[in-house]
Image (cartoon, rainbow, N blue to C red):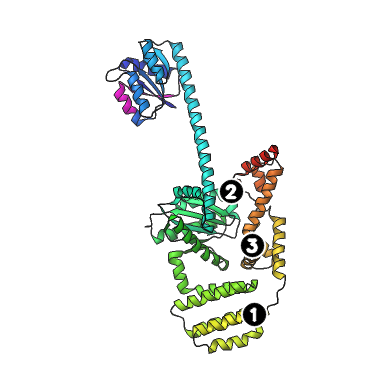
Amino acid sequence: MYKILIVDDERRERAGLENLIHRYKYPLDVLLAANGEEALEVFEREDIDILLTDIKMPFMTGIELIDQVRKRGYTPFCIIFSAYGEFEYAQNAISLGVIQYLLKPVLLDDFQKLFDKVCRLCEEKEKRIAEDRTIMEEKKNKQTIESFKEFLLYLEDGDYSEEDKKILEMHFLNKKYRLIILSSYSFLFSIHWKDYEADLRKITGNDTLVINMDDSQILLVVPTDGDESERWIKNCCEEIINISKAAHQFHVFMVVSSVCSGLAGMRSEYEKLYEILDYQFFISESSYILYDKEYVNRKQSDMLPVYFNKILTYAKLKDYSGIKKEFHNVFQYIDRTVGFSSIYIKYSFTDLMKKLCENLKAEYLLLDVAEKLYEARTLETMKRVVLQLIDEMEKNDEANDTDSRLVQMAKRIVSERYQEMDFGVSYIAGELHVSLAYLSALFKMETGQTLVKYITAYRMEQAKCLLETSNMKISDVAQKTGYLNTSYFISLFKNREGCSPQQYREKKFGNEEAK
C-alpha cells in the first residue's frame, strides 16, 4: 500500500476523490488535509508517496505547498487539482516536478489514466529504492568483510594501512569491548554455522561482531559499557557451552578478555587471549577462562600441573626450546606464588623429571638429577640443575625421522578424507594412534601452522580448483570440499580470499577471456 495525501479546502472535493480511489480499488491509503499547514503536519508524521493538492486554498496555495514539501526534503509524486487551468499555474507546477495537472470537474477516463500512471511510478520508485538499497548493502558487506579481514591481520601482526585504519575506526574506536575466542577441535562450527552464529548473537547481543577465523575458531567482539557484572559474562559463557553441547554436540573452549577500547588495547588483549588459548591442549571438556578473573585465580591455584603437561608435550616433540621456555614460566610462577612448601616443590619436580627422562630416553641421568634436586637449598639452584639437565639431553639426543613421518602421514590422510563432513583432527589422531594434543603441537612445530588451518587451506585450494575448472553450483562446491553449510563456506571463503566464490569464479573467467 502506498500513501496519498489529498489537500483541498472543500470537504466534498476531498471525499469525492477518496471515493473514486476506493471505487477503482487502487492500492492507496488515503489521508486528508484541508489546507497547506495541515498537510505539512501530516508530512512530519507519515511517509507520503503521492501528494494531490488544490491550487486555490487559504493560508497557502498548492504551488507554495509543493515548494515547501520539496524544501523540507520530501519526494512524493505531486498532482495539481484545480478548476483553474491557466498556463501560468501549469508552468509553475512543472518547474516543481508535478507529474500531472488534473482539472475539475474530474473526467473518469482521465482519473483512471492518471492513477494507473502514478501507481506504476510508485512501484518503479519502490523497486529502484530496493535495488539501490541492495547495492549499498552489498557494498557495505564487502567493505565490512574486508575490514574484518584487515582487523584480524592487525590483531595478529599489528600492521594496517591508513585507509584500513579509517574503516576500522568507524567500527571500533571510542567504544568498549570484550573479546572472546571460541575454539573447538570439531569442524561442526562449519556444519551449523548459520544457526550457531544466530545463537551467539542471541546470547551476547545483536551488536556482537561474529568473525569466523577458521574452521575451529571464532572471534566475538562484544560491545560493553564496562559495568556489566562478572555473573553476566559467566552466564554468557555457560550458555554458549550449553547450546554448543545440547544443540550442536561439540565441546568448546573459550577465553574472555578484560574490557578494552581502541585498536591498540584490543590487540593487547588479543595477544593475551592467544597465550591462554594454548592451554586448550590440556583441557578435554568444555571450559572458559576470564582473563581478568579466572586466569588470575587459575595461576594462583592449579597452573603447575598445566605447565608440567606442556613441558611433557614439548618433550614428546623433542622441542627443547619449548621445554626451556615452559621451565622458565614454572620458576617465575613459583617465585611469585605463596603457599608452596620446599618438600612439595622438590617432590613435584622429581616426578616431572622422571617422566621427562623417560620421554627423552635419558633414564641414565635420573639418579643424578634427583640427588641434586633434593640437595638444592634455593629455588635458583633447582632452576640451574634443571636447565643444565635439559642442555645435556639436547646435546646427547639422537634425532630420528618418526615425527616427520607422522606429519607426512597426517597430510596424506587430509588429501584422502578432506571431502568428508565429519572429518577433523580427532579422526587423524585416531588413525595415527597418537593423542590429539600431541599431533596438533607436532604439526604446528614442523609446518608453522596448525593442522586445523592446514585442513582449511587444503579445502579452500580444492574449492578454488573446482570454481576455476567447472560450472558446478556453489552449494555443490561446498559439499565437495567438506562443508555441509553453504553460507558458512561462503563466509569462510570471503575471509580468506577477499571475495565470494562466485566473484572469484567470475574474476578468473574474466581474466581468461581477457587473454
List x then y, in percent, for residue 99. Answer: 44, 18
Residue labelled with disc 2: 488
Instruction: Give yes or no for contact between labels 1 and 2 (Cβ–Cβ under 8 Å).
Output: no
Question: Which secondary structure lies at badge 1?
Answer: helix
Mark sitting earlier along the chain (1/2): 1
Q: Which picture quadrant has residue 337?
A: bottom left
Residue labelled with disc 3: 426
Seen in the picture, residue 161 relative to 15 is either above or below; the reply is below
Q: Is residue 382 left or right of residue 8?
A: right
Q: Rate crowding at label 2 as few (under 14), some (14 to 19) or many (20 or more) other CA atoms within 10 Å.
A: many
Residue labelled with disc 1: 393
Between 339 and 376, the residue placed more toward the observer is: 376
Q: Quadrant of the N terminus?
A: top left
Between 295 and 399, the residue placed more toward the observer is: 399
Give the amino acid at mark 2: Tyr
List x then y, in percent, for residue 255. Answer: 49, 62
Q: Quadrant of the C terminus?
A: top right
Mark sitting earlier along the chain (3/2): 3
User: Is 40 part of what is drawn in magenta?
Assistant: yes
Give the amino acid at mark 1: Met
**Residue 326 visible from this viewpoint:** yes
Give how far apart the Cα atoms at labels 3 and 2 are.
21 Å
**Residue 238 visible from this viewpoint:** no
Question: Which secondary structure lies at badge 3?
Answer: helix
Question: Which secondary structure lies at badge 2?
Answer: helix
Magenta residues, as a range?
Answer: 26-42
Which mark is nearer the camera, 1 or 3? 1
Mark sitting earlier along the chain (1/3): 1
Seen in the picture, residue 430 relative to 65 is either above or below; the reply is below
